[in-house]
Amino acid sequence: MTTNDDLFSRLEQLNEIGAALSKVRDIDRLLEHILIAAKTITHADGGTLYRVIEGGKALRFEIIRTDSLNIAMGGTTGNPINFPNIRLYDDAGKRNDAMVAAYAAIHDKTVNINDAYAAEGFDFSGTRTFDQRTGYRSTSFLTVPMKNHEDEIIGVLQLINAKNPMTDEVVPFAAADQSLAESLASQAAIALTNRLLITQLEELF
């Protein structure tokens, strides 16, 4: 398959995903679909989906997946995520720009990192600890803010270790991966916002 064919195939996937997301009624299942779809469309080995909570002051881990380690937490798995929330601001109101997921949410900006171990300006100490404990090697990161149609950041989609589908080698996330992930994150944010509004209305009546 040529690169153009692969991109066309993934664009078709993106359209199908967008249509499918609007039909999912359960919030946990929707979040799961979003992360799995993003991983599939970018050939990522792992990923995390965060939701913005506490009135925009923190990120909560919602779904975690790492295929090569058989890790599946949150969502419909029944496996709880016990990681603490990531604060976006400290008590003095200073921005938490050291954590890449927080940075993406605060600045409404995608962060594409080729190698976390060589990246400057971000704190990947937690990632290194995880790698030491599991024998994993977290390399490429693509972190995308999820912004709904009201221009609100409601979450962050983080993808880890893009893989060459032909060789299984870990590679950086390409520009096409970033564009696809950003488009999916936008569609997902709107689908999630709509589902939350419908759920609130259902509970009200």
Image (spheres, helix red, strand yellow):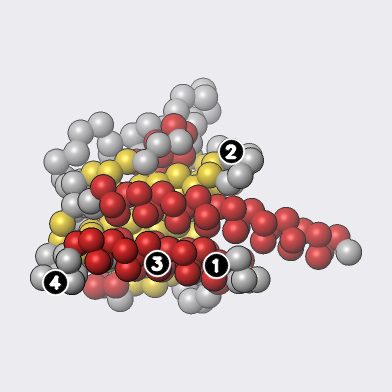
Work out how far the residue at label 4 is from the one at label 1, CA to CA, in angstroms.
Answer: 28 Å
The local crowd at label 4, few if under 14, some if 14 to 19, many if 20 or more residues have their Cα within 10 Å, is few
Image check: 192 left or right of 34? right
Image check: 187 left or right of 70? right
Work out how far the residue at label 4 is from the one at label 3, CA to CA, in angstroms.
Answer: 20 Å
Farthest residue in the right direction?
205
Q: Which residue is nearer to you in this view: 142 or 42? A: 42
Work out how far the residue at label 1 is from the one at label 2, CA to CA, in angstroms.
Answer: 21 Å
Mark toward the start of the polypeptide (2 vs 3): 3
Identify the disc placed on residue 19: 1
Mark toward the start of the polypeptide (3 vs 1): 3
The local crowd at label 3, few if under 14, some if 14 to 19, many if 20 or more residues have their Cα within 10 Å, is few
Q: Amino acid at mark 1?
A: Ala
Mark toward the start of the polypeptide (4 vs 1): 1
Work out how far the residue at label 2 is from the one at label 4, CA to CA, in angstroms.
Answer: 38 Å
The reply to whether callout 2 and callout 4 are in contact (CB within 8 Å) is no
The secondary element bearing badge 3 is classed as helix
Residue 24's place in the image compared with 121, above or below, is below
Mark toward the start of the polypeptide (4 vs 3): 3
Work out how far the residue at label 3 is from the one at label 1, CA to CA, in angstroms.
Answer: 11 Å
The reply to whether callout 4 and callout 1 are in contact (CB within 8 Å) is no
Residue at (32, 68) in percent of width and height? 9
Q: Which residue is mark 4?
A: 166
Identify the disc placed on residue 151: 2
Mark toward the start of the polypeptide (2 vs 4): 2
Work out how far the residue at label 2 is from the one at label 3, CA to CA, in angstroms.
Answer: 26 Å
Residue 59's place in the image compared with 93, above or below, is below
